[in-house]
Image (tube, helix red, strand yellow):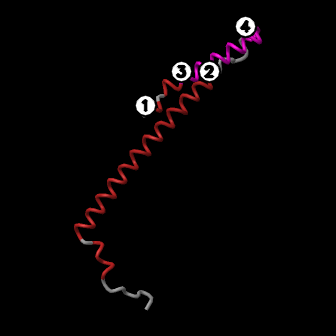
Amino acid sequence: MENLDIGDMMQLYKRVQAGRLAHLLEEHPELGQSQDRDICKIDQALLFNCLLKTVKAVILVSSCSYFFAMGFKMLLDIQADLNGWDAYAEGEVLDCAA
C-alpha cells in the first residue's frame, strides 16, 4: 500500500496548488488582498484528501475480503475432497420430471 501513500499525494497536490496560486497572484495581485474569494481552495484539498482515504479503505477492504473468500473456498474444496462429496456425479441420474 506504499504506492497509495496519501501523505505523498497530498504533498504533490499542495505543490501544484501553490504553483497555481503563485501564478494567479502574479497575474492578479489584487486577489491576494481579497477576503471574499477563496483562492486557496482549502475545501477542494480536504475533499481530495477524504477521497484518497476512502479509495484506499475500499481497496484494503475488498482485497481482504477477496483473500478470506478464497481461503474459505479452499477449505470447502478440501472438505469436499475428504468427504467424497464430488462422487455424486458418478451415480445414476434421476429424472425428476417423470
Per the image, the residue denoted by label 2 is: 16
Quarter of the picture containing the N terminus is top left
**Percent position (x, y) of residue 41?**
65, 21
Write the start and end of the magenta stretch as one range: 10-31
Q: Earlier in the sequence, mark 1 or mark 4?
A: 1
What is the C-alpha distance between the residues marked 1 and 2? 21 Å
The residue positioned 28% from the left and 58% from the top of the image is: 75
Residue at the (46%, 41%) spot, across then down: 59
Q: Main secondary structure of the magenta part?
A: helix
Secondary structure of the residue carrying numbered label 2: helix
Q: Of marks 1 and 2, which one's residue comes earlier in the chain?
A: 1
Image-quadrant location for residue 72: bottom left
Residue 3 point in image, percent of width and height: 46, 32
Element at label 3: helix
Tell me the residue that label 1 is attached to: 2
Marks 4/3: CA distance? 26 Å
The residue at which mark 3 appears reads as 11
Q: Which residue is mark 4?
A: 33
The residue at 74%/11% (across/down) is 31
Instruction: Say whether residue 2 is left or right of residue 12.
Output: left
